């Protein structure tokens, strides 16, 4: 019975990972491809990450979701269910838009992308908190891998399936199908395992706002807390730079929508599954710290594989290799990163603390990645992808301080036996 309940919890966080990944990929991959195919200037496409600022700013309204939960189905899933229904409507509405260089049309697209990001970021707040509250400490490695697999699988299904649909039936069909995928997750949310009620619920907005920061600073220490936050900011910066320009690069270098979709579809999903499974197995053996070092190195290989295509050219075989390296590394990096964020959260304040940490991470794929289009245009593709791989260097420097190779757990991780509140 325990094994069955454990498996149900792991599967649940994987399905909610699908719900997190789908809207983000709609607002990035599909939107990038759509605008590129509509001949929107590259620097304007490069500004799309700015619409993702809600992923960074969500920490400001996360305390509201802690303070005023929707009680049905439980205090986390009530908000999850509401956000998922809203996301279905927003994504479906994108099928009605027509991109053009007309400022009014671009403004409308930017506004819808912003609304999508707000709803998606709000959903992420409660999904991250639900996962942290649901999983026992010994389940977090497997849970992180499952959530990462669901997230990446949703992205790959939407990007590959979306591009295939766009090439055959047009872009509105791609957005309609993405809305359908979100709708399929709703029954899983309604029937997911419940989390236990809090023994000490949040009773005031002041407590919801100030408590999480005070607990994190007291636990981590004034010297280590800023370094931990910088690590969260920079650890996945190479991903942000690559994701901002991967689709425009492939489109502008002769790969059509169907080819991009096929390679990032079954091939990419298989590579992501391999990377996530490999990451989960190695994580249990290596521990948190060594996994952070090794997986980051593997992730940077994906950026270098795109540099190889830009430098030496190549056809579909080269694209398959690049997508394989990217998705294996992405699966590994995503799994260890989710486990890192969960380890830094006190379950008492999981919604706000996780929102703070993931919001800081979102800066790396919004503000820090916003100049990607301009850099690619000024430097050229080869130099841009080299620069994106070099963006992993700050994370390695920070790891030396807060996640030394010879220690198993990151300094500042939450220890239930030493709860300071």
Image: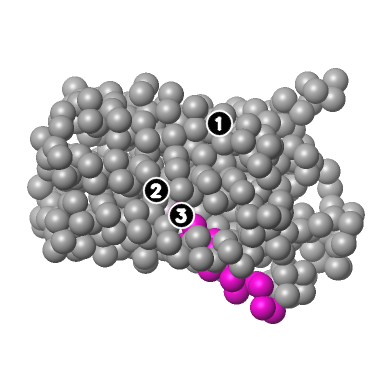
Identify the residue under disc 2: 300
Could you classify mark 3 by the number of other residues whose Cα lies within 10 Å: few (under 14), some (14-19), or many (20 or more)?
Answer: many
Q: Nearer the viewer, mark 2 or mark 3?
A: 2
Q: Earlier in the sequence, mark 1 or mark 3?
A: 3
Q: Quadrant of residue 82?
A: top right
Residue 177 part of the magenta segment = no
Q: Is residue 295 left or right of residue 214?
A: left
**Main SS of the magenta segment?**
helix
Location of the C terminus (image quadrant): bottom right
* Residue 339 screen position, x and y as percent: 64, 47
* Vertical order, 68 against 205 (above or below): above
Residue, x 32% and y 33% (percent of image)? 323
* Residue 322 screen position, x and y as percent: 30, 35
Q: Outermost residue, front direction?
A: 406
Residue 236 has which mark? 3
Residue 230 part of the magenta segment = yes
**What residue range appears in magenta?**
222-237
Task: Report whether residue 147 is seen.
Answer: no
């Amino acid at each position: 019975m325990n094994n069955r309940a454990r498996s149900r919890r792991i599967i649940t966080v994987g399905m909610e990972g699908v719900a997190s990944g789908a809207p983000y990929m709609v607002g990035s991959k599909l939107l990038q491809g759509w605008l590129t195919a509509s001949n929107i200037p590259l620097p304007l496409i490069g500004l799309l990450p700015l619409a993702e600022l809600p992923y960074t700013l969500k920490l400001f309204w996360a305390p509201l979701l802690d303070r005023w939960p929707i009680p049905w189905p439980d205090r986390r899933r009530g908000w999850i269910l509401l956000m998922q229904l809203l996301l279905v409507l927003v994504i479906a509405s994108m099928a009605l838009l027509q991109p053009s260089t007309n400022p009014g049309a671009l403004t409308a697209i930017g506004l819808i992308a912003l609304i999508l990001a707000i709803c998606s970021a709000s959903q992420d707040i409660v999904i991250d908190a639900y996962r942290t509250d649901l999983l026992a400490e010994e389940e977090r490695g497997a849970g992180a891998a499952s959530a990462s697999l669901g997230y990446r699988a949703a992205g790959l299904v939407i990007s590959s399936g979306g591009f295939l649909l766009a090439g055959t039936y047009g872009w509105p069909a791609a957005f309609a199908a993405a809305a359908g995928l979100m709708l399929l997750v709703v029954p899983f949310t309604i029937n997911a395992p419940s989390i236990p009620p809090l023994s000490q619920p949040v009773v005031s907005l002041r407590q919801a706002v100030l408590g999480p920061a005070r607990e994190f600073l007291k636990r981590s220490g004034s010297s280590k807390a800023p370094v931990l936050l910088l690590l969260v900011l920079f650890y996945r910066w190479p991903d942000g730079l690559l994701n901002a320009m991967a689709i425009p690069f492939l489109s502008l270098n002769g790969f059509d929508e169907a080819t991009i979709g096929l390679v990032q579809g079954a091939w990419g999903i298989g590579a992501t599954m391999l990377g996530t499974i490999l990451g989960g197995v190695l994580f249990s053996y290596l521990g948190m710290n060594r996994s952070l070092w090794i997986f980051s190195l593997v992730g940077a290989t994906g950026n270098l594989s795109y540099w190889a295509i830009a430098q030496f050219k190549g056809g579909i075989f080269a694209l398959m290799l690049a997508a394989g390296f990217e998705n294996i590394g992405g699966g590994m990096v995503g799994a260890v990163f989710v486990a890192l964020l969960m380890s830094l959260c006190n379950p008492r304040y999981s919604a706000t603390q996780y929102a703070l940490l993931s919001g800081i991470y979102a800066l790396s794929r919004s503000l820090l990645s916003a100049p990607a289009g301009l850099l690619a245009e000024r430097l050229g593709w080869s130099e841009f992808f080299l620069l994106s791989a070099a963006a992993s260097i700050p994370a390695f420097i920070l790891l030396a301080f807060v996640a030394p190779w010879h220690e198993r757990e990151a300094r500042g991780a939450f220890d239930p036996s030493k709860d300071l509140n």
